[in-house]
Image: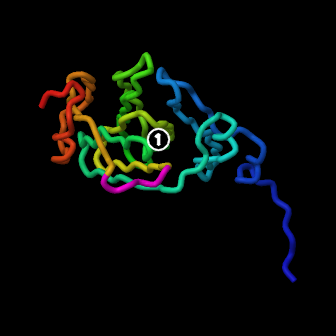
Amino acid sequence: MGRAFRCAVAISPSNLAGRQAMRFEKTVFEGVYTVHPERHADERGYFVRAFCEEEFSRAGLREHFPQTSFSFNVKAGTVRGMHFQRPPNAETKLVRCVRGGVLDVVVDLRPDQSTYCQWRGFSLSAENGVALYIPEGFAHGFQTLEDNSELAYAITPSFVPGVAEGIRWNDPMIDVKWPLPISTISERDTTWTLLGGAQ
């Protein structure tokens, strides 16, 4: 019969039980939050809780995400966006950068809000560990700041083929200030309708 050992563990998932493991910060947009996980570090590295249903629920946020997707991008300067789905298929997204770094951009498409047609960029990187919670009613996109950058998306509801929409990355009505020259962008993302109706 093996011997039982008692050891003091400085950091483990069980040590986090009952503790707040992430901080939710409001942004200028109603309903959009930056999510800052609490890293618990020791000589091995660190442990971090990436998601917790209970904490999201306490913050009044969606806590069920039936789909997770990844976006890998080879070149710095790559732009993807600006994407959204209209009701009844409107999406809530939880986006984090797991490799490299990006400027993650949201545009408020809710006409009843004072921030309608305004945009903001958020620095997401593997280093800072920050995630962005984006509710329904926003267009979303990003530009990579480093080669080989990768993002993870938790999405609800699941993506519905054929109903995706977008606004153009350079729509003058929004005027997003991308930090780098555009190195790569899909043809589709260059042909979305402009909000002002011009082509």
- What is the tally of numbered marks visible in this picture? 1
**Which residue lies at the image location 47% right of the left edge and 20% below the top edge?**
28
**In the rendered structure, which amino acid carries the disc numbered 1?**
Glu
Please state the extent of the stretch shown in magenta in the rendering: 157-162
Which corner quadrant of the image does residue 189 belong to?
A: top left
Is residue 145 visible to us here?
no
Identify the residue under disc 1: 127
- Most extreme residue toward the bottom is 1
Where does residue 1 sit, x and y in percent of width and height? 87, 83
Side of 75 relative to 70 (left or right): left
Where 155 sits versus 24, above or below? below
Side of 12 relative to 123 (left or right): right
Judged by its main secondary structure, the magenta piece is loop
Which corner quadrant of the image does residue 7 belong to?
A: bottom right
Which corner quadrant of the image does residue 168 belong to?
A: top left
Where does residue 128 sit, x and y in percent of width and height? 49, 37
In the rendered image, the quadrant that contains the C terminus is top left
**Which residue lies at the image location 26% right of the left edge and 29% below the top edge?**
178
Front residue of 54/150: it is 54
SS under mark 1:
loop
Is residue 67 visible to us here?
yes
Where 69 sits versus 130, above or below? below
Front residue of 54/178: it is 54
Where does residue 115 sit, x and y in percent of width and height? 41, 19
